[in-house]
Structure formats: structure tokens, C-alpha cells
Image (tube, rainbow, N blue to C red):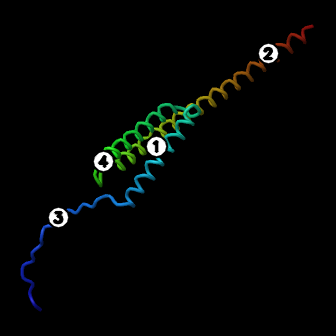
Amino acid sequence: MKRIESIHVAPTSETRALPGRFQSALQGAASGLARGLAATVQLAAPYVPGGTVLSAAVNGAVAGASGSARAGAPAGSSAPDDVLGATRQLQEEARTFNLQYLQLQENMQRESREFTALSNVMKVKHDSAKAAIQNIH
């Protein structure tokens, strides 16, 4: 068996490509999708709990992402990461709002059950008093 002499590893250089047509098309599609999402959230904002906050956050994320894309951000910039981070933040806020809404529903159901139980007790008490008065006459 032949022994391997020393191995020389050459340092690598980082290659950067200029944005191509495909990357530009993807960026255009992503920005169009973001604008469409922002418009949809803005339309639904009055009907969703916390919708105005959600709408403002989406509009801010879209404006920030499109601003950095227009400023000539270099290839591999963090604009898609910003949109992804904003999307995750919006999902977390939506999850929080959904939990708050669920808690509100549970509280309303509990209060409704308590009211129904109290109402039934008061009705039985009233009917008993009424029957006792009728039996006296």
C-alpha cells in the first residue's frame, strides 16, 4: 500500500452572481404576492379581531421589503429574509389573537352557563313561592 504524502487544500473564493432573469422574476412575484396579501389583510381588517394592527404590520413589512428591493439591494440580501421574518411575526400575532379570541369565547360560554343556572334557580324559587301563595287561598 502506497502512503499518501501531504495534502494541500487551496483556499476557496466566494463567487457572487449578478441577479439573473429568473431571480428578478421571483422577486417580482414575491413582491406582487406581498402586495396582494397586504391588500387582502387591509380589506379583512375591520372584521378580524386586531385586524388594524395586523394590517399595519403587513403594510410595514411590504413597504420595508419593497423599499430595500428598489434601493438596489445586492444579490443575496436580506429582503426575502425580512419578508419571511415579517410573515413569521404576523403568524405569531395571529396565533396570539386567536388564543385571545378563544379565551373570550370560553369566558362568554362560562358566563352564559352561570346565567342559565342562576336563572333556572330563580325560576324554581319563584314558582315555589307562587304555588305556596296559591295554596293559601
Q: Cα distance, mark 1 to mark 3?
A: 38 Å
Q: Which dot, 3 or 2, sits closer to the camera?
A: 3
Which residue in the rendered view is the most extreme toward the bottom?
A: 1
Position in image of residue 6 (x %, y %)? 6, 79
Picture residue at 8% right of the left edge, 87% below the top: 3
Q: Which mark is residue 72?
A: 4
Name the residue type under label 2: His
Marked residue nearer the N-terminal end (3 or 2): 3
Instruction: Quickly name the residue at label 3.
Output: 13
Q: Which dot, 3 or 4, sits closer to the camera?
A: 4
Marked residue nearer the N-terminal end (1 or 3): 3
Name the residue type under label 1: Gln
Picture residue at 47% right of the left edge, 48% below the top: 32
**Which of the pair 105/79 is nearer the observer?**
79
Q: Is residue 56 above or below residue 73?
A: above
Instruction: Quickly name the residue at label 1.
Output: 91
Position in image of residue 82 (x %, y %)? 35, 45
Mark 3 element type:
loop
Q: Is residue 88 above or below residue 111?
A: below
Q: Which dot, 2 or 4, sits closer to the camera?
A: 4
Name the residue type under label 3: Ser
Which residue in the rendered view is the most extreme toward the left?
A: 5
